[in-house]
């Protein structure tokens, strides 16, 4: 199994909703990442988990809350989002921090 | 601040030509370099990585690295319309990847 999976593929939510994005990998990778990507922009790093511990938080607003239940799973909990948070949310994993990362297919999030 | 610079394009080439994509980086501590291809609405896909000075070839793709000039390039030989995408250059040091803004490549039939 050499891929990163993400669910759901699409998500529409209101500003008062609480939802979660899920990511899973079975490649034995020890680093997992959340990126946010707006149209025609490069991926923007949000969080890095290394060996299941949060190692980097790029000053992301608290309405985004990451969670790493185990070495294969990564969640992103969403609460009270704003319309400007609408974007493609990408999960990635790599063997170690900073080495070549494999991306999941992404979740297209729309906040109404 | 670590930066990776790419020309946003679009770079237009005819089918069968060689496409040359370029990237410069600011952090001399960067050790590894990656090229990702991203089709519109899809996630980035890793197509090449290079760690050492010189050339690395894989099929129609050649990555070139010059650490002294802090310069990375990607050559695509025999370009096909299916190669039309945005190509993201990324550099890695001791922590995470730093992405360039990407170059859009258009290959016309």
Image (cartoon, coloured by chain):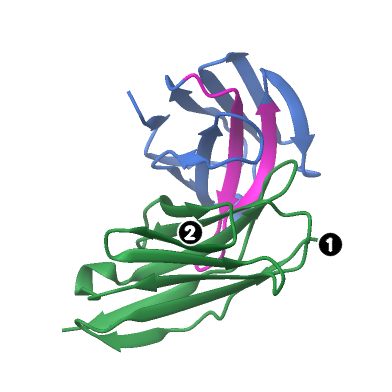
x, y (%) of residue B78? 22, 76
Which residue is situated farthest in the front direction here?
B54
Q: Which residue is found at the position 21% from the left and 74% from the top?
A: B81
Q: Nearer the viewer, residue A14 or B97?
A: B97
Read off the residue under disc 1.
Answer: B1
Chain letter, colour blue: A
Which residue is situated farthest in the left direction here?
B109
Q: Which residue is found at the position 51% from the left and 43% from the top?
A: A90
Quick one: label 1, few (<14), some, or many (20+) residues within 10 Å?
few
User: What's the chain of the residue with tag 1?
Assistant: B
Read off the residue under disc 2.
Answer: B35
Q: Which residue is found at the position 72% from the left and 54% from the top?
A: B30
Q: Are marks 1 and 2 in contact (CB under 8 Å)?
A: no
Residue mark closest to the camera, 1 vs 2: 2
x, y (%) of residue B61? 34, 64
Q: Quick check: B29 left or right of B19?
A: right
Chain letter, colour green: B
Q: Nearer the viewer, residue A38 or B45?
A: B45
User: What's the chain of the residue with tag 2?
Assistant: B
Tell me, yes or no, whether the highlighted magenta stretch contains residue B38: no
Q: Is disc 1 placed on a helix, strand or loop?
A: loop
Reply above or below: A22 against B48.
above
Residues drawn in magenta: A28-49
Quick one: label 2, few (<14), some, or many (20+) residues within 10 Å?
many
State the quadrant of the C terminus of chain B: bottom left
């Amino acid at each position: 199994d050499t891929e990163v999976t993400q669910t759901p593929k699409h998500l529409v939510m209101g500003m008062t909703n609480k939802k979660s994005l899920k990511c899973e990998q079975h490649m034995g990778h020890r680093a997992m990442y959340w990126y946010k990507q707006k149209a025609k922009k490069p991926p923007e790093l949000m969080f890095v988990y290394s060996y299941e511990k949060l190692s980097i938080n790029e000053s992301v607003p608290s309405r985004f809350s990451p969670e790493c239940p185990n070495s294969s799973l990564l969640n992103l909990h969403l609460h009270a989002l704003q319309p400007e948070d609408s974007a493609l949310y990408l999960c990635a994993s790599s063997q170690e921090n900073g080495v070549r990362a494999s991306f999941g297919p992404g979740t297209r999030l729309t906040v109404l | 601040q670590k930066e990776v610079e790419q020309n946003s394009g679009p770079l237009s080439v005819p089918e069968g030509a060689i496409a040359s994509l370029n990237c410069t980086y600011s952090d001399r501590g960067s050790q590894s370099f990656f090229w990702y291809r991203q089709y519109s609405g899809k996630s980035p896909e890793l197509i090449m990585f290079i760690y050492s000075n010189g050339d690395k070839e894989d099929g129609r793709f050649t990555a070139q690295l010059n650490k002294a000039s802090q310069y990375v390039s990607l050559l695509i030989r025999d370009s096909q319309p299916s190669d039309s995408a945005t190509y993201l250059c990324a550099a890695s040091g001791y922590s995470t990847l730093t992405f360039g803004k990407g170059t859009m490549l258009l290959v016309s039939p």
